[in-house]
Each structure stands twice: as structure tokens, then as C-alpha cells.
């Protein structure tokens, strides 16, 4: 996975215009061992909700994490997490944490972690809708200037 991202960076550096880049989070789920493999190139840090502890924390990905196409010689690495029953992983774009309300205040990382903790005991789709509702309620009618994209992955089964 890291080698593939390194090759993609080399290609992007050659092919895209100066000042342009591509932010990517490459994620592969393996159902048989309940693992998620991640490699980040300039995307926000995913959030892990642990059903066992009730904690929500950012996932530190290994290796360089520069967006693709900015600099040469970047060495991306794969991060592997084994998930437990009831665990959730939240993948999101920076438009979520940078969503701004009418007073010019950003939604921020602390609010994201709080809503993940508060909605963690539910299903993955419930968490997604809870995050979405919190962001929408926070911004009100303020216009947004970035995409707001969310994916929540959960491990089902008996707890």
C-alpha cells in the first residue's frame, strides 16, 4: 500500500501543474480479521471509536503524509489496525472540521471527537447521521466553501 502511494506521488509530481496536489486516504477493510489498512497522503486523521473503552481518538498514520504531487522522495507507509466488535472508524474530509458557523467559528476537532464519543454505542449509520446533524446544526445557514464528506465504518456482531 505504501509503495503504491509512493508511486502515485511520483507520477502526480510529474503530471500535475505546480501548486496543485491530491489529498488521499487509502483505506482497505479486511473482514476476515477485522482490520483496516490505512495510508494517508494529506487527508485528515481518521477517528477510532473503541467500543471497549468508549474513547474516541485520532489515528496516527505511519510514514510521510504529504499530499500527492507536492514533493519528490516521499515515503508513505501502511498503518494496520485490528478492530473489535462495536468499534467504529470515521473517515472525513477537512470540510467537516473546518465547517464555519454564522459567527465565523469552526466546528473543529474537539466537537468531532465529542459527537463520535456520544454516538459511539449506536450503529455506524447512526453515528454518521449524528455527526452530520451536529455539523449542520452548528453551521446553520452559513455558506460553506469546502466539501463535507463522511464515511463511518463499523464492526458488527455481538458485543
Image: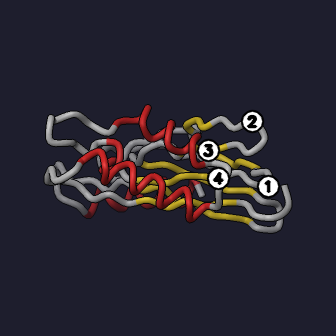
Determine whether, in the image, residue 71 is placed left or right of residue 2: left
Residue 2 vs 47, above or below: the answer is below
19 left or right, relative to 106 = left
Q: Secondary structure at mark 4?
A: strand
Q: Earlier in the sequence, mark 3 or mark 1?
A: 3
Question: Which of marks 2 and 1 precedes in the sequence?
Answer: 2
Q: Are marks 3 and 4 in contact (CB under 8 Å)?
A: yes
Residue wearing tag 3: 48
* Alpha carbons under labels 1 and 2: distance apart: 12 Å
- Give the Cα distance between marks 3 and 4: 6 Å
* Residue at point 14%, 42% (across, down): 102
Where in the figure is residue 23, as x and y percent of width and height?
A: 36, 53
| Rendered image: mark on residue 88 | 4
Q: How far apart are the two marked residues, 1 and 4, measured between alpha carbons?
A: 9 Å
Residue sitting at 47 percent across and 61 percent down?
A: 129
Q: Which residue is mark 1?
A: 85
Q: Which residue is mark 2?
A: 53
Amino acid at each position: 500500500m505504501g509503495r503504491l502511494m509512493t508511486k502515485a506521488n511520483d507520477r502526480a509530481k510529474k503530471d500535475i501543474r505546480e501548486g496543485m496536489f491530491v489529498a488521499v486516504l487509502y483505506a482497505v477493510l479486511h473482514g476476515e480479521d477485522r482490520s483496516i489498512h490505512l495510508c494517508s497522503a494529506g487527508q485528515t486523521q481518521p477517528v477510532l471509536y473503541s467500543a471497549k473503552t468508549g474513547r474516541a481518538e485520532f489515528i496516527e498514520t505511519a510514514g510521510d503524509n504529504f499530499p500527492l504531487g507536492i514533493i519528490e522522495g516521499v515515503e508513505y507507509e501502511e498503518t494496520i489496525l485490528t478492530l473489535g466488535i462495536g468499534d467504529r472508524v470515521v473517515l472525513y474530509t477537512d470540510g467537516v472540521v473546518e465547517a464555519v458557523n454564522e459567527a465565523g467559528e469552526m466546528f473543529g476537532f474537539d466537537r468531532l471527537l465529542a459527537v463520535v464519543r456520544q454516538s459511539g454505542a449506536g450503529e455506524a449509520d447512526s453515528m454518521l447521521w449524528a455527526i452530520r446533524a451536529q455539523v449542520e446544526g452548528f453551521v446553520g445557514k452559513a455558506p460553506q466553501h469546502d466539501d463535507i464528506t463522511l464515511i463511518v465504518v463499523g464492526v458488527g456482531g455481538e458485543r
